[in-house]
Amino acid sequence: MAVSDPCIISVAITGSGTTLAQNPNLPCTPEQIATSAIESWNAGAAIAHIHVREADGKPTHNMDYFREIVERVSSETDMVLNLTTGGYTGLDPHLRLEPLTLEPELASFDAGTMNFGEGVFMNPPSFLREMAASFNEYNVRPELECFDVGMIYNCLNLINEGLIDGPLWWQFVLGVRGGAPATPKMLLHMVELLPEGSQWSAIGLGRGQLPMNTMAIIMGGHVRTGMEDNVYYRYGELATSNAQLVERCARLTRELGREVATPADARRILGLKGGIGVR
Ligand code: ZN
């Protein structure tokens, strides 16, 4: 990581927890999700993180929807696609891994079990190993999603066991109720624990989004924004689109003296394979 590297902006389009009641602009259908990803690419996002939903906003795991989104986004952009393996609360853990069969360049790798709001997000050690083996089988780079400090060590254990190898790409998800808070001190601490040569990005939930994104830009990390993590543009004002949030990250990146990474830059920085998502 270096402040001289371009800053990679990931956009998390819809997630599984945000509701239409929280923000009616939330993309839900495959067409809406793909359109929002393409608008975000135009605004400066290099990576799109994808979950799928029914038109009424209900989270689902319909692989046809994943396929449709991949096809739509890949036909119009060179965006890197990052498919979820977190799915949604209550989804069978093995079904969570199905998007790997589409062999995306990246997929989320949730690095441990935690309380998540009022629920429990189950990722026990045996499942982490199974998940790492699936990533290797389909040659998908894991985005190591760490919601707390201990999850970094879960990943380091898997690295020591030879189940995950580099280049390492970490995503710190801060501010989930049950996980580490979205504070500058927490982010500094987590970054200090990473092995040499790591690349990392930071997410802050809700009101933590803008401060964590700004910290990451200053520190030489990368950022994720989008309506999976936050539905507001500023206090009391709902975001009108994912692209609006991406535009602000791109503007901040440039104001703070860094370039905004293109998808080609992201592939170079993260050593990605290309393929799906490449025009
Ligand atoms: Zn997600």
Image (spheres, rainbow, N blue to C red):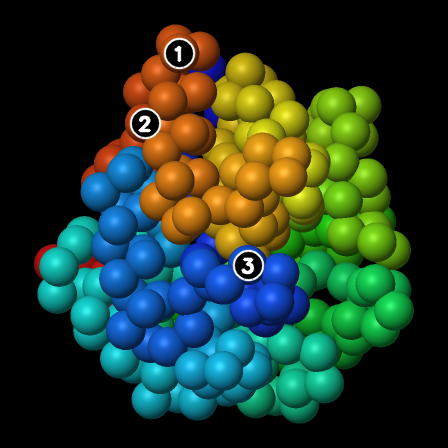
User: Label 2: few (<14), some or many (≥20) within 10 Å?
Assistant: many
Amino acid marked by disc 1: Glu
**Picture quadrant of residue 126:** bottom right
Circle nearer the N terminus (1, 2): 1
Mark 1 residue crowding within 10 angstroms, few (<14) / some (14–19) / many (20+): few
Name the kind of residue labelled 2 in the image: Val
Q: Residue visible at 49% across and 82% down?
A: 56
Between 272 and 66, the residue placed more toward the observer is 66
Q: Is mark 2 within 8 Å of ligand 1?
A: no
Give residue 130's position: percent from left, percent from top. Answer: 64, 78
Q: Which residue is mark 2?
A: 260
User: Which residue sits at x=31%, y=32%?
Assistant: 261
Q: Which mark is residue 23?
A: 3
Q: Secondary structure at mark 1?
A: helix
Q: Position of residue 279 (x, y in %)?
A: 12, 58
Nearer the viewer's eye, disc 1 or disc 3? 3
Who comes first in sequence, dot 1 or dot 3? 3
**Residue at 44% from the left image edge and 39% from the top image edge:** 245
Residue 69 visible in this rendered orientation of the protein:
no
208 displayed left or right of 27: right
Give me the C-alpha separation between circle 1 and circle 2.
11 Å
Please tell me whether mark 2 sits on a helix, a strand or a loop. Answer: loop
The correct choice, above or below, for 80 with respect to 217 in the image is: below
Q: In the displayed structure, does residue 271 sit left or right of residue 108?
A: left
**Please, what is the three-letter code of the amino acid marked with disc 3?**
Asn
Q: Nearer the viewer, residue 192 or 30?
A: 30
Q: Residue furthest front?
A: 236
Where is 215 relative to 70, above or below? above
Helix, strand or loop under label 3:
loop
Q: Which residue is mark 1?
A: 255
